[in-house]
Image (cartoon, rainbow, N blue to C red):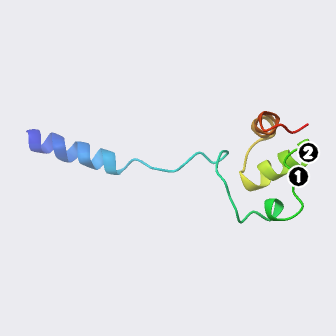
Amino acid sequence: MRLVAVIIFALMTAACDQEQDITGSTTPACPLRNYSYNPRDMNQCVSACKTCDRGTTVTCTTSCTLKGAR
């Protein structure tokens, strides 16, 4: 019976997805961040966040505000 429980636990653990948070991820290949991107400009920061990190307006505005954009 223990062997069955260990096998089930191992299968459940292996099935877990290790995907990271999308909004907080860094994408160095994003075109907006490689060219004229100013992280202190709120409009540019939100645009880059929405495009590169696939965030929403609310999460990107909050993120950019915390990073010092105005």
Q: Nearer the viewer, residue 66 or 14?
A: 66
Quarter of the N terminus within the rendering: top left
Q: Is residue 63 above or below residue 25?
A: above
Q: Is residue 66 left or right of residue 7?
A: right
Q: Are marks 2 and 1 in contact (CB under 8 Å)?
A: yes
Q: Residue at left 78%, top 38%? A: 67
Seen as rendered, the residue at the extreme left is 1
Q: Pointer 1: what residue?
A: 38
At 17% from the left and 43% from the top, the residue drawn is: 6
Residue 66 position within the rendered picture, expressed as x and y whole percent measured from the top left: 77, 34
Find residue 41 and name its label.
2
Badge 1 element: loop
Q: Which residue is pictured at 27% across the width and 49% down the height?
A: 11
Question: Which kind of residue does numbered mark 2 sit on?
Answer: Asp
Residue 26, image quadrant: bottom right
- Compared across the picture, whether 36 is left or right of 2 comes to right
Whether residue 52 is situated above or below residue 24 in the rendered picture = below
Q: At numbered mark 2, what does the secondary structure look like: helix, strand or loop?
A: loop
Amino acid type at mark 1: Asn
How many neighbours does mark 2 have within 10 angstroms: few (below 14), some (14-19), or many (20 or more)?
Answer: some
Residue 49 location (% of width, % of height): 78, 48
Q: Quadrant of residue 21?
A: top right
